[in-house]
Image (cartoon, rainbow, N blue to C red):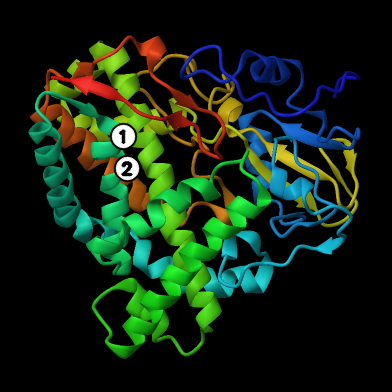
Amino acid sequence: MTDTVPYGIPLDRETRYDPPAALMALHREAPLRRLRYYPDGTLGWIVTDHRLGRKVLADTRFKSQLTAPIKVPIPMPQIEAMGDYEGPLPVTPGMFIEMDGADHTRLRRKLTGVFTVRRMRLLEPRVAEIVEERLDALEAAGGGADLVAEFALPVPALVISELLGVPRADQDRFTADAATVMTMTVSAEEKAEASMRIMGFIAELVAAKRAEPQDDLLSDLAADAELSEEEVIGMAMLLLVAGHETTAKMIGLGTMALLENRDQWDLLRERPELMANAVEELLRYVGVIHTGIIRQAGEDFEFEGEQIAAGEFMTVSVQTANRDGEHFDEPDVFNVAGDAKGHMTFGHGVHQCLGQQLARVEMRIAFEHLIRRLPGLHLAVPAAQVPLRTDQNFYGVGELPVTW
């Protein structure tokens, strides 16, 4: 650990795909170090390398359920609005990513069987149909379109909606609010209102599923006697929001990375069998989780020679962990044929992303069909003019003007 204590997680990038230079500088100086988390001088910790990142996320002494006062190294008005509140944060029923121990295990197990590799393979034909539908709409736009609005966002939204049983006519009722929930800089009131609208929408769906069950996940959850209505709503909200925003960011930013590295696009045209590997490399390289993963120490203990105090916060920098030269060969090179094994984009440990197999299927099929259908796809504006989003929990492009 060094003696200097920088403030906050750098979010603004000098290049489109590399972590901020200030964040990489922290990584080079010390893999575990103090970080000033809050303007009042509150100190926390940051881990920037691959080995220690995995170690933190596998250590159950670092908790996901947080206790106030909450101090975070990123701008979050809703945290600041909590004022002098102290004690364990109220956890939204069903939102198991905010839980630890038995509560987390009980709820996560309700969904584990749904997202297995085998189940996701059975879903592939339907994902391919949705991707083709969106490519038809993209081509119908007449030779130029916003790839985010026409493809990257609708594909995962349609897939998770179909899995849950959300009618297509109702999908616009949650996509805009989901983006608000994921935006760090909106007020506490705006975020709360957006969350309540999504939960109200899901409550209507749950009531409809109970009255007339369908062959979908929400009907199954609604019929589970071990789950309260509030838990069903919370689990469905988690799946809806996390299940499309993250993958949409990866499809949009991943497409841009391939278009800017035309040799990689052309290699995938020539060798489509590399696509599954390319998805892993994109997940590693483009770095959509730019705010890191925050945990809180549940007790006093020693970690890597440092004394961690109960209540202190630890941030795992996924960006820098995925660029760690101790784990990856040529970590700053984008190579769809390279070895991205062990990347941390889906996290690690008991909270590792439940929907990772679904995300892989969606990305692989989306990129396969996009490259095959529109081999001449290219940016319609200079890359420097493509708007980037650093104000949300997940980094990506705000829009992606393309032509073919």
Q: Label 2, secondary structure: give it.
A: loop
40 or 81: nearer the eye?
81
Give how far across and how far down residue 88 sits, in percent. 80, 64
Up the image or down, 324 lies above or below 240; here it is above
388 or 50: nearer the eye?
388
Q: Tell me where residue 166 sits by quadrant.
A: bottom left
64 or 301: nearer the eye?
64
Amino acid type at mark 1:
Val
- The residue under label 2 is 153
Q: Label 1, secondary structure: give it.
A: helix
* Visible residue check, residue 109: no
Q: Are marks 2 and 1 in contact (CB under 8 Å)?
A: yes
Up the image or down, 87 lies above or below 78; here it is below
Residue under the image location 8 percent in, 35 percent down: 140
Give how far across and how far down residue 5 sits, in percent. 86, 23
Q: Tell me where residue 75 sits by quadrant.
A: top right
- Where does the N terminus fall, quadrant-wise? top right
Residue under the image location 38 percent in, 28 percent down: 253
Give how far across and how far down residue 45 sits, in percent. 80, 35
Amino acid type at mark 2:
Leu
Labels 2 and 1: the sequence-earlier one:
1
Callout 2: 10 Å neighbours few (<14), some, many (20+)? many
- Where does the C terminus fall, quadrant-wise? top left
Q: Report the label total.
A: 2
